[in-house]
Amino acid sequence: MSAQLALNLRLRDGSSFGNFLPGRNREALAQAQALLDLATAPGFRSLYLYGERGSGKTHLLEAACRQRADSGRAPFYLCLRDAGALDPAMLEGVEQHSLVCLDDLGDAAGKPAWEEALLSLWERCRQRQGVWLAAASAPPDRLGLRLADLATRLSTATVYALHVLSDEEKLSAMRLRAGNRGLELPEEVARYILNRYPRDLGTLFPLLDRLDDAALAQQRRLTVPLVRELEEKA
């Protein structure tokens, strides 16, 4: 497996444990951190996170990968959203990495070749006493997996449900993200965005990135009039 594939990470603006706003997800955050803290101890460790879009699943997986990469130990990250267009053979040898992260795991459900490949990878990771971190929209027994053995294995992981942030917490998360980019996001602009667009962070964060790029290109501060102007041009 090439280094490029092994490090196929799209780490958004430095997703880290430090800039994850937990809300009601403090225990899940602590478990993800503990998973890596104990990664050098003997024994196979696995964590399974589930929740709706914008609940922070991908952020935590990316944060885990970043921490492992920063420590010089190559992780593996794969989003299975496009599993139908990918070859399950790409999972061969993945167990050699210090951390295996699989996002949108449910998108592999109902695809026999992928389910078999994932079960095989689980067993290889277990035999090598590796670290497995996966995320999906539902718990293992509700993913619609056809391979009962795979659902059973996934259910043996430590399983946590992630909760979507409240609107006030989303405002804080948006301003935190803006600050990480060096962008001043006035509260009135953040509230305007929150009231005008779908309230999931998976939509709000990319939108904020685009607004930041546009404001930078025009050498203007991010204001409500500027956002309205950009909306009219969209």
Image (cartoon, rainbow, N blue to C red):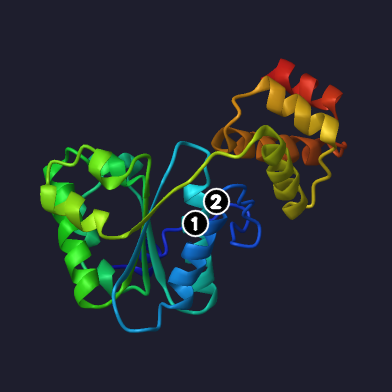
For the question of whether residue 190 can be seen, the reply is: yes
Amino acid on which the number 1 mark rests in the picture: Ala
Q: Give x and y (percent) for residue 17.
A: 59, 62
Residue 170 in which image quadrant: top right
Residue name at image x 60 percent, y 51 percent: 22
Residue name at image x 48 percent, y 71 percent: 34
* Quadrant for the N terminus in the image: bottom left
Residue name at image x 70 percent, y 48 percent: 177
Amino acid on which the number 2 mark rests in the picture: Asn
Are the two marked residues, 1 and 2, in contact with CB atoms closer than 8 angstroms? yes
In this rendering, the answer to whether 160 lies above or below 107 is below
Q: Give x and y (percent) for residue 25.
A: 55, 51
Secondary structure found at label 1: helix
Q: CA distance from mark 1 to mark 2?
A: 5 Å
Q: Give x and y (percent) for residue 44.
A: 29, 74
* Quadrant for the C terminus in the image: top right
Q: Name the residue carrying label 2.
A: 25
Q: Name the residue carrying label 1.
A: 28
**Left or right of 131, for residue 170:** right
Residue 145 in which image quadrant: top left
Residue name at image x 12 percent, y 53 percent: 149
**Left or right of 199, for residue 109:** left
